[in-house]
Image (cartoon, grey):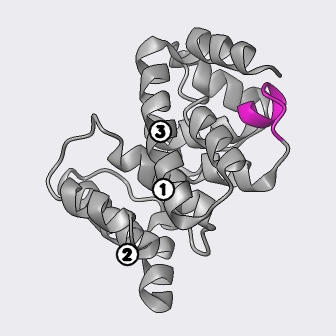
């Protein structure tokens, strides 16, 4: 699929506001990939498509998940923030022709993290969390750390996310817990 076709299709399916966010994630991810010597090509594709499952018409998310035969667990059933990354992995493969497992996993786990994340997965997770228009307490420290220590930045970001989910009584995906434990044990 040509670059212009991908961009046009994305704008139609996720809307211009979400597409502009994706472009900021691309820019942030490319900086991180260069800094940490991670494949620029894979990083670019994963960053551009990371939100391809966050459809403008939110009712279509559940319909598409069902069409792909995806059964949601308790935590994802009522959480669109988790649903879009699950769906995105399938949309990237089926509708954008992405076959590279590294890219598909980066899209799939950009919202929750997981244990044994690859550097490209870490970069996409972090780029989404620290892109220039994000603004939350502790962000400056994560941005600074991301340039020198992917694992440290990822751990800090995941722990802040976990704290936020607990405070707001939002369900916590087991992958997030496992990612935190894995990073603590291997950092």
Quadrant assignment for the C terminus = bottom left
Query: Residue 104, image x and y in percent?
Result: 72, 48
The residue indicated by pointer 1 is 32
C-alpha span from label 3 to label 2: 21 Å
Q: Secondary structure at mark 2?
A: helix
Q: Nearer the viewer, mark 3 or mark 2?
A: 3
Q: Residue furthest left?
A: 137
Residue 182 as seen in the image, left or right of residue 170: right
C-alpha span from label 1 to label 2: 14 Å
Q: Earlier in the sequence, mark 3 or mark 2?
A: 3
Query: Residue 98, image x and y in percent?
Result: 81, 38
Quadrant assignment for the N terminus = top right
Query: Residue 162, image x and y in percent?
Result: 31, 63
Quick one: 100 or 108, which is closer to the camera?
Answer: 100
The residue indicated by pointer 3 is 27
Up the image or down, 36 lies above or below 12; here it is below
Q: Nearer the viewer, mark 1 or mark 2?
A: 1
Up the image or down, 165 lies above or below 179; here it is above
Residue 131 as seen in the image, left or right of residue 91: left
Q: Quadrant of residue 119?
A: bottom right
Q: Quadrant of residue 134?
A: top left
Residue 184 is marked as none
Q: Earlier in the sequence, mark 3 or mark 1?
A: 3
Query: Residue 63, image x and y in percent?
Result: 66, 22
Can you see residue 111?
Answer: no
Quick one: 126 or 183, which is closer to the camera?
Answer: 126
The residue indicated by pointer 2 is 152
Segment tinted magenta in the rendering: 91-98
């Amino acid at each position: 699929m040509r670059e212009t076709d991908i961009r046009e299709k994305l704008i139609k399916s996720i809307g211009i506001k979400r597409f502009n966010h994706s472009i900021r994630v691309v820019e942030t991810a490319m900086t991180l990939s260069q800094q940490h010597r991670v494949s620029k090509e894979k990083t670019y594709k994963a960053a551009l498509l990371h939100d391809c499952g966050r459809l403008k018409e939110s009712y279509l998310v559940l319909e598409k998940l069902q069409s792909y035969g995806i059964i949601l667990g308790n935590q994802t059933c009522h959480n669109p923030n988790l649903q879009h990354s699950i769906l995105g992995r399938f949309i990237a493969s089926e509708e954008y022709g992405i076959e590279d497992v590294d890219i598909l996993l980066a899209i799939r786990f950009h919202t929750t993290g997981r244990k044994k994340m690859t550097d490209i997965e870490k970069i996409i997770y972090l780029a989404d969390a620290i892109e220039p228009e994000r603004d939350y307490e502790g962000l400056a420290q994560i941005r600074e750390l991301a340039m020198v220590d992917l694992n440290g930045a990822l751990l800090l970001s995941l722990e802040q996310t976990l704290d936020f989910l607990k405070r707001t009584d939002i369900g916590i995906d087991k992958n997030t817990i496992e990612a935190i434990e894995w990073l603590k044990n291997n950092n």
